[in-house]
Amino acid sequence: MLISKERLLDEEFGGFVLMARLTILNPLCETLRVQASGLYKQALAEATKQLGAVTIYDVEKIVFTSSRKEGVWEPDTLFRILGMYLRREARKLAASNEDLRNLADAVRAIAGSSSLEPSPKQEGTKALEIRQIELYEDPDYLNKHYAPIDLGDIFELVPGPGAPPKHHILLAQPCDMMVRFEDPVGERKRGVTDGVMVEVVIDTAPAGDQQRVKYDPILMYRLDYYQKTGGHAYVDFSTARPVNLTLLDLCAMREDGKAELAAFDKTPDGLIPSWKIHNHHIRVKLRAAGERWDAIMTACAGVAKSQKQNVINAVKDSEFGDLFGPNLWIPFTPTKKGKNTHISFECRRIRRLNQPWAGALFTAYTQYLSRAAFEHDYGSIGFDAPSVLPAAPEAAE
């Protein structure tokens, strides 16, 4: 590491001390990383060995039968088992390695012992990038691998023509959203149809400025480091609206994450078995809805121009409401070419809030719904209230 002579001046001397500390830490931290990586490789080798000892009978039952039944991608179950072995072996090796423990003690004695902050001239930190990877799932994985919708999925919606897009996050019980292979086949249990979408309010204050969003932990939930700049965002529980899960399912059936479907589309090969059946069921229902919608629109061809748009909106909401509604508040456009009906919603899945933060958000929402409600407080009347109350506004004629 190079340290500028300018740092020996009084006004820069704190930076000199900081750089000297980092110079001492550099070889220690590098050795720590190398040793930790070596132990991790040993743990991975042992975990792979233990996974290999699982009998083909158990692999068939645990990885494939259970995953198929629950509507889970089989490799995810396999990675879950491997991760369990890996975590156990890595911790065991780390706890018993005296060199690693001594190195950690040595670095701890030096690192963070000073209140000095790095100079703005120093190389940028990767802390924000790493934290965002931990908090949020990348849309490329979610959409290109057709990951089923889940608690914490975040969608970009366009509320109307020319309107700026808004972000909403999905809240629903994860078990209720599972599309299983049986009971019923390719559908959700207990007739579950709806979840809740809550708006994500992004704090647009410039970096370093005081936040513009007034955060109330009872009425809101903070999404840490939501923006690329590291700025936060807030889930405003008061904006919650019901949403049909089948509508959002369309996002999980396309590589671009858009809520679009054509009735005679080919089922994507990457969908897991239960979702292939689910996709087929939706397309069959879309064909029927498209035929009814087309027939009614043909019959309404002579409607006066002044009323035509109202009729179009009413008919499409009625005919597609059974499949994607009935509260169709997300704008959508149906089109028909020959026998093929295509429907497109102004909705796209853009990321996911990972567990356990998604679970914490859901808990916060249930607490918001169950918060105590009291009668209004009249004890202060006559003490701090104005002596003359303003007149009530008159109703418009």
Image (tube, helix red, strand yellow):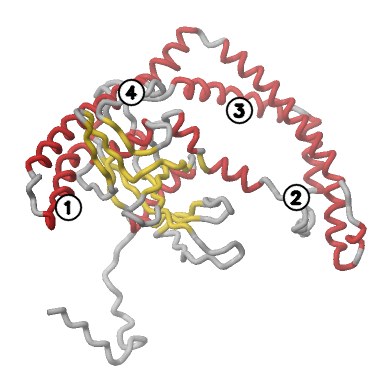
Q: Earlier in the sequence, mark 2 or mark 1?
A: 2
Q: Nearer the viewer, mark 4 or mark 1?
A: 1
Q: Residue at x 81, y 31 (%)?
A: 99
- Front residue of this view, candidates 132 and 164: 164
Q: Position of residue 23 (x, y in %)?
A: 86, 46
Quadrant holding the C terminus: bottom left
Q: Which mark is residue 267?
A: 4
Q: Earlier in the sequence, mark 3 or mark 4?
A: 3
Q: Secondary structure at mark 3?
A: helix
Mark 2–mark 4 distance (CA, rounded to whole Å): 48 Å
Categorize mark 1 by other alpha carbons within 10 Å: few (<14), some (14-19), many (20+): few
Q: Nearer the viewer, mark 3 or mark 2?
A: 2
Q: Residue at x 57, y 45 (%)?
A: 132
Look at mark 3 in the image and give the residue it sits on. 87
Q: Secondary structure at mark 2?
A: loop
Q: Which mark is residue 123?
A: 2
Mark 3–mark 4 distance (CA, rounded to whole Å): 37 Å
Question: CB of mark 3 within 8 Å of CB of mark 4?
Answer: no
Above or below, 34 relative to 237: above
Look at mark 1 in the image and give the residue it sits on. 309
Mark 4–mark 1 distance (CA, rounded to whole Å): 33 Å
Q: Amino acid at mark 3?
A: Arg
Left or right: 193, with 356 as reference point: left
Q: Secondary structure at mark 1?
A: helix
Q: Secondary structure at mark 4?
A: loop
Q: Amino acid at mark 1?
A: Gln
Q: Residue at x 49, y 52 (%)?
A: 223
Mark 3–mark 1 distance (CA, rounded to whole Å): 59 Å
Residue 366 visible, this angle? no
